Image: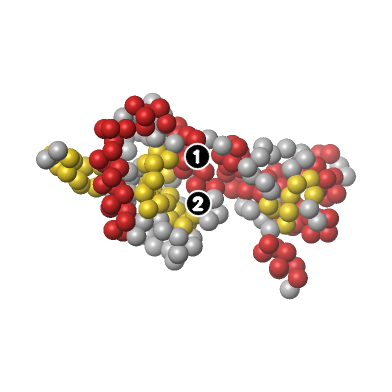
């Protein structure tokens, strides 16, 4: 089920830190603002995931008591999933080195966030570069820009037909089957990346993409062909 989140509770001032900016997203969706390179990478990884409905930065402000002092804490992101049975993820993005250096200082706020998430039916998790900076991230960063380009419907349809006829095929093999002309293959490669970026062609995205990467027709496309 889709539902609209409120605007971020804390406005992020661009340039306030060394790597602030906005992550471009397809038309009709709000750009995601980040405050660090790791936040940018986390947002990109989740934006790329077809199982995720939305990513909201600075979603809630949590008040808690620590040593008799009232404090406030704003987690980095709230991730909503397309599967309504999967609880939303309230996420804090931190470098492992910072986590270890400030563990005692951060303990109370993270405990408060965990309790807050449980009350909402969510889950809270601190996520470091160990979970974010993986081969899948590199593939996501490469493929996401293709979602912003115009769709070449004719070439996409040709690639789809060829892969349906060939069965699982390497990128190089599919392009060679679709076009004999080298220039056409180069143009067709852009359409192919769009198909991969949209998950109409499936690949092992936990490995680096190259000409030998094997592509499969997405399940919904195969079912559509069967009638």
Where is mark 1, residue-wise? 131
Furthest toward the left, the residue is 68
Q: Position of residue 150 (x, y in %)?
A: 62, 49
- What residue lies at 42% left-to-right and 44% top-to-bottom? 32
Choose between 98 and 161: the one closer to the eye.
98
Where is mark 2, residue-wise? 27
Q: Quadrant of the N terminus?
A: bottom left
- What residue lies at 49% left-to-right and 54% top-to-bottom? 52
Q: Position of residue 213 (x, y in %)?
A: 74, 43
Which disc number belongs to residue 174? none
Q: Position of residue 13 (x, y in %)?
A: 31, 35
- For disc 1, the neighbor class at 10 Å (few under 14, some 14 to 19, many from 20) is few
Residue 84, above or below 32: below
Residue 85, above or below 89: below
Q: Secondary structure at mark 2?
A: loop
Q: Position of residue 124 (x, y in %)?
A: 36, 49
Choose between 88 and 41: the one closer to the eye.
88
Quadrant assignment, res 75:
top left
Q: Quadrant of the C terminus?
A: bottom right
Query: Would residue 179 be found to the left or right of residue 139 on screen?
Result: right
Query: Would residue 85 be found to the left or right of residue 111 on screen?
Result: right
């Amino acid at each position: 089920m889709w539902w609209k989140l409120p605007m971020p509770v804390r406005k992020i001032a661009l340039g306030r830190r060394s790597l602030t900016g906005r992550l471009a997203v397809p038309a009709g969706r709000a750009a995601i603002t980040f405050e660090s390179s790791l936040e940018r990478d986390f947002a990109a990884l989740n934006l790329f995931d077809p199982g995720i409905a939305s990513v909201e930065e600075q979603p809630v402000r949590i008040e808690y008591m620590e040593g008799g002092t009232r404090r406030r804490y704003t987690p980095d992101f709230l991730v909503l999933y397309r599967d309504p049975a999967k609880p939303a993820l309230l996420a804090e993005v931190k470098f492992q080195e910072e986590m270890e250096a400030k563990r005692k200082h951060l303990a109370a706020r993270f405990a408060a966030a965990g309790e807050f998430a449980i009350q909402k039916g969510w889950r809270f998790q601190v996520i470091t570069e160990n979970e974010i900076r993986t081969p899948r991230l590199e593939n996501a960063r490469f493929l996401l820009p293709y979602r912003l380009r115009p769709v070449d419907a004719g070439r996409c349809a040709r690639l789809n037909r060829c892969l349906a006829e060939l069965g699982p095929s390497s990128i190089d093999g599919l392009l060679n089957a679709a076009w004999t002309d080298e220039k056409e293959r180069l143009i067709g490669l852009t359409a192919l990346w769009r198909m991969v970026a949209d998950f109409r062609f499936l690949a092992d995205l936990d490995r680096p993409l190259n000409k030998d990467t094997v592509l499969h027709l997405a399940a919904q496309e195969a079912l559509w062909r069967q009638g």
